[in-house]
Every structure is written in structure tokens, then in C-alpha cells.
Amino acid sequence: MRNLKGVVVVGVVALALGVSTARSQQLQGEYKIGVLEPLTGNLAVQGRLHLEGYEIMRDLINTRFGGVMGKKLSFVTGDAVDPTATASEATRLATREGVKIITGTFSSTLCGAASEAASRQNVIYWETSCVDPRFTRRNLKNVFRTEIDGNGFGWYNIEFIAKHLAQRLGKKTSELKIAYLSEDSSYGQSVTESARQRAKQEFGMQEVGLEYYTFTTNDLTPVILKLKNANPDVLHHIARDQDAILFWRQAREQNFQVKAVVHAGATGYGNPGFGKAFGNDANGPFALLEPGPGLIVEKFRPDGRLIEKAFRDAVKAKTGSDVLAGGHQLAGGGLWILKLALDAAKTDDLDKFRAAVMSMDLPVGSAVNGWGVKFDDTGQNSNARVQHYMLQWQNGQLVTVWPEEFTTNRAKWIPLGGWDQRK
Amino acid sequence: MGPAEIARPAPLHDIPQLIVSTILLGGIYALIAVGLTLIFGVMRVVNFAHGEFLMLAMYVAFWAFSLLRSDPYLTLVVSLPLFFAAGWLSYRAVMRPVIQASHTVQIFTTVGLSIALQNVALVLWTADARFVRTDYYAAIVRLFGAAFNVAQIVAFAIAVAATAALFAFMRWSYTGKLMRATAQDRDASSLMGIDTDRVYAVTWAVGITCVGVAGVLLAPIYPVYPTAGLQFVLIAYVAVVLGGLGDMAGALIAALLVAAVEVVGSYVLGTSWKEMLYLLVFIGILIVRPAGLFGQRGAEALGT
């Protein structure tokens, strides 16, 4: 019996290997797309991480997943230093290099210019990271975005507060007092305003404060005093970077007691720098991000599990780290969905490609990061399908704590408790 | 609820904390402003790279802390000669060739120096915000319902001491007299046998040392990153002009005034209003007193 099992296993493995070899041998010809990222200048660190994510996923697609449309996927890159350079690079990729699809550019300052230029050349523009809500509101038929936008971040934060925090705090959502604090960039405003709207309209939360500030502010004590008077249960704080550090230090000085702090995105509390600045004193705040440590990949659907594991192994082989960077996850996750779309459309003709994208319908857990796919008419993937995760600072590390079905960790310190008791 | 509804009358129990915050924040601005006003007062050069020297000093404190475990206050003592030498060298290398040139050229030079230093920091240390987390970073003193951050009290005390010391130095020391003479009339001082080039070098180096001290003192309070200087130095410019160009005590008082407008404005109207408020006060005072609160009329044209 045992032997028989062994034979079956060997047989299956051999078959699988055979299939995958056959697949990679089948690739005929090359399919070239443009990749536009800031590779020099201020944004280069993130831009290069994204490019690396694309490259890792490209190699994986070519070696193990049959390329795109049966062809070997290849890149031609452009350097998107600033909006002007981005537009001219997008034009170059379309006219000189002759690509029909451009993907990129991560920064909200660049994706608008890149997609406008692509649109003029009638080229498909596939955005994987930028979160500016205006990106998909220009009636451009060539524009698609796999990641949620700033409004989606606000949507998820309220989802977490209403469906997890409220219960843990033993309150109905209509009893929950929430205060909003945000830096005043378009990112901070779009997240905050969409969170406010959903909290009020869908869950009837009580808004007890709202304050915008410039992230270079030198003193947040007056704001903290006002927050203390407002006495919220939950503080929804969208921070840039140094302002999160300043706020946290001064909130501690003022002994500001709030039951939870919720942030969204890779800045502020979502930036590893926050943990470096405070060590264990960083314990407590939440940041909405891509899945981090603690993720149970087995909870994904079989197709999602397969690609997620392969991607994680490939990133580890390349970087030596088990912890994926957000840039890797967004670029790799977005490129994977592009592959699925191209395989379904079997062409890069804009109308047919668009029709194929619109008819894609994959539930949560089907792709990288546990994402699903359901695009709307504007070219935006849906909030509910692009699964996001709440991470919490726990002993110097950001770990995944929600949705609980996808993680081994549990959210701690709810309510937060005294500043010295979050150990 | 709209933003306006957040503005509520100050509950009385917050007033002590608002006063404390004003004084401590004002101390930080004053610390940065004294060096700036010294350089401006004597050399008539607006140093747009002042904030970058602040940022570099914050990095000195950060690296000394993270690599050598050196406490920022120890770093402060050890690095005083370093800052003076850096000031002296930067004068020789960058400022000396343009000291006789027009204001426009000097502005371009210091702005260029500022951009260069920012980018050097960006290349060397990336854009990450870093923080010197000493064991006592969260140490506070509570008094009358207000919390005093210990590092900020130290910064404020040193700001007052530095202002007083510079004031005394300028008023009573021989070098101070030479500096004042040079400020009043560069050519006449040269004719009286004063080595004005040396006076400028000393002034610049002392000014940079002041901002270096400020940077080290700020390191346990604020995170450091390549453009960290900008968020402080803009306000320091306002304090310098408001106090009267080249007036140390004026800069200290103006720094406290700006901080008060910032803190009270943030509390009563909202944080997004504060820049507008202090700039309105700035414009208002300059309309009534064009030379600043304590400045002497025509000071900006003196000595050129």
C-alpha cells in the first residue's frame, strides 16, 4: 500500500514536472510590454522595488506559468523621474518600442501623466500601485488599476473598525465615537473623507473630531489636547512619516488615552521607520497594508495559493527575506492579474482586451496577496475583491491581524490601555 | 460635522499646557534663529542653507547615538569644535568667494549649498525618518496639569543661555566689537585695520556652531530626515525678520511670539490655519514696524 502511494506521488510529480517543462518549451516568440517606474531621483527606492517585483513575477510567469498568450513575457523599461519625464517615456515606449501595454508607476504624482500619454497613443495603461482616486475618473477607456484607491483604504479601515474593533470593544457601531486626524495631502484627504462618509452613512458612528494638518508641523500638542477633550474610542489617523513619530511621542507625553489607532498605507504607522523609532513603545497602532507576517496562505483558494507560494519563494530566493516589501506585492500582484487578463483576451487589441478584463470575475483568495478580480466600468478593481489586511505593531514588528481567517496572529491591546502596559 | 465645529472655546484646564507648549516650541525656534540672525546681522547674508546645517547636526547626533551609543548631550560637547571647523571650512570654500558679490549671487550660493547638502544626505542616508530614542525620550515633568518634555526644557534653557551669551559676546568682547564695527561699515572697518575677512569667517563659524548645537538638541525631540531643516528654518526666518535683523533678544522674543500664534491658532482654529496666522502677524507687524519689533531702521542696508 505504502509503495503504491509512493509510486502515485512520484508519478504525479513527474507528470507535473513534465507539464511545466512542456509549458515552458511551448513558449513561442516574445511578448513585450513597457514598464514605467521612477528608477532615479527621489522616488527611486520605491520605483526599483516595484521593478524588482515585476521582474520576479515575469520570470515566474515565463518559467512556471506558460508566459502570456503562449509567449515569453519581456520588458522594456522607462525611467519615470517626474511627471514630464514620465509622459515622454510613456510616449517613447509606445511609439519607438511599439508596446501595446504599459504598466507602472506606483506614485500618485506620476500615474496621471503616464496614463494620459498612453491614452494618446491608444495604448493600454495597467496601474498596479498608485492610489489617487482621480486616476480612474477621467473616462479613459485604456486605463485599469488592480490596487484599490485612497477611497478604498478608507472603506477598509471602516470595515475593520465596524466589523472587528466595535465588537472587541463591546460596543455597537452607532455607539462608537471616532475622531479623524490626517495630514492634508490628497492621499490623506481621500482616505479620511471616504472613511467619514462610510462610517456615518453605513454604520452611524459618532464623529467627535476632525483635524487636518501639514505633515511638516512641529507641534501636535494643541491637537492632542483637543482630542483628549473629544475623548474618542477610535482615532483614525492618516500620517505621512515624521508626523506619526511626532504625534506618538507627544500623545504619550500628554497621556492621551484612546482605545485604538487606525492608519492606512505604507507611510506613517505603516512605515518600518515607525517601529525603528520606538521599538516596543510602538506597540498598538494598526495599519492597512498588503499581507504581512502571520498570513496563512493555505486559506487562499487553490489558484491563489499556488501563485502566492511560488511568488513568496521567488522573492525569498532573490532577496533572502521572508518578509515581502509592499512594492514587490503590488507590482507582482498587479502583473499576475495582467497575465490572467491577457490569457483570457488572447489579444492586446484594446476593445477585446477591455471586454475580457470586464468579464473577469475571481473571488477573494484567487490571486497574489489573496486578491480577487472584478473591475468596474472605470477600470477600477473592486474594493471588496482586492483583499487588504490590517497589520498591527507588535513588539517591533508589523504583523497581520485581520481578517482573522487569513492569519495566525490576533489583534492585541484592545482597548490600548496605559502607555506602559502595552508589552 | 465640519472642521469649523471642532473649534471650540479653550477649556480652562488646557491653558497651562498651551503656555508650556508655546515656551518650549519657541525655545526651539529661538535656538535656530540666533545663529541665523548673527550671520545676517554681521555679514548681511541670508543663509538659506541654515536648515541643512541643522539637519546635518541632527544626523551627527543620530549616528553618534546609533553607532557609538553616545548620548546626544555628550555628543553636543564633543562636536562643538567639529561644528566650528565645519563652519570655518564652509565659509572658506563657499562663502568667501561671494562675500563681496551682490545679494542675488549670495542667495544663489546659499540656496545651491542647501540643495547640495540635502541631496548628499539623501544619497548617503536615504529619505527615511530616523529618531534618536534615548532611554529618557519620554521623560516628562508634570506641573500644574501641564507636561514638560525634559529634552525640550534643556533645549529651551540652552536657547536662552546661548542668546544671552551671544548678546554679551557682541556687546562686551573685543571680537564682538570688531564684528559690530564690520556690520556697521565694512570698508571703514577695513581702513581701521580690522581683518574683515577673518571677522566674517568667525561670524559664519559661530553661527553654524549655534545651529549645530540646535540640531543635536533637537535630535531626541524630532525625527531626522534629509529635508528636516526646512520645517524649522522657515519659521526661524520669520522670527529673525520679526525680531529685527541681527537682534538676538529680538529673535528670542519673536520666536516665542510665532510659537504662541502657532500653538493658540492650532488649538482654537485648527492646525491647518497656523501657517496663515503667523504669516499674517508677520505681515501686520512689518506694516507697522518695517524694521521688525526691535530692529533699527535701514539695518538691512548697513555695511554694504
Image (cartoon, rainbow, N blue to C red):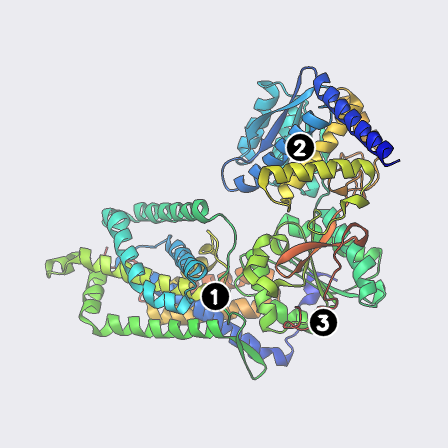
Q: Identify the residue at image location x=67%, y=38%.
A: A313
- Chain to which mark 3 belongs: A
Tell me the element at label 2.
helix
The span from disc 1 to disc 2 (Cα, nearest Å) is 42 Å
**Label disc, if present, on residue B294 of the rendered structure:** none
* Vertical order, A271 against B289 (above or below): above
**Label disc, if present, on residue B220 of the rendered structure:** 1
Disc 3 residue type (three-letter): Asn
Discs 3, 1 touching: Cβ within 8 Å? no
Residue placed under numbered mark 3 in the picture: A231
Residue placed under numbered mark 2 in the picture: A57
Q: Position of residue B157 (x, y in %)?
A: 40, 75
The first of marks 2 and 3 along the sequence is: 2
Q: Position of residue A286 (x, y in %)?
A: 69, 58
- Which of labels 1 and 2 is toward the front? 2
- Which of labels 2 and 3 is toward the front? 2
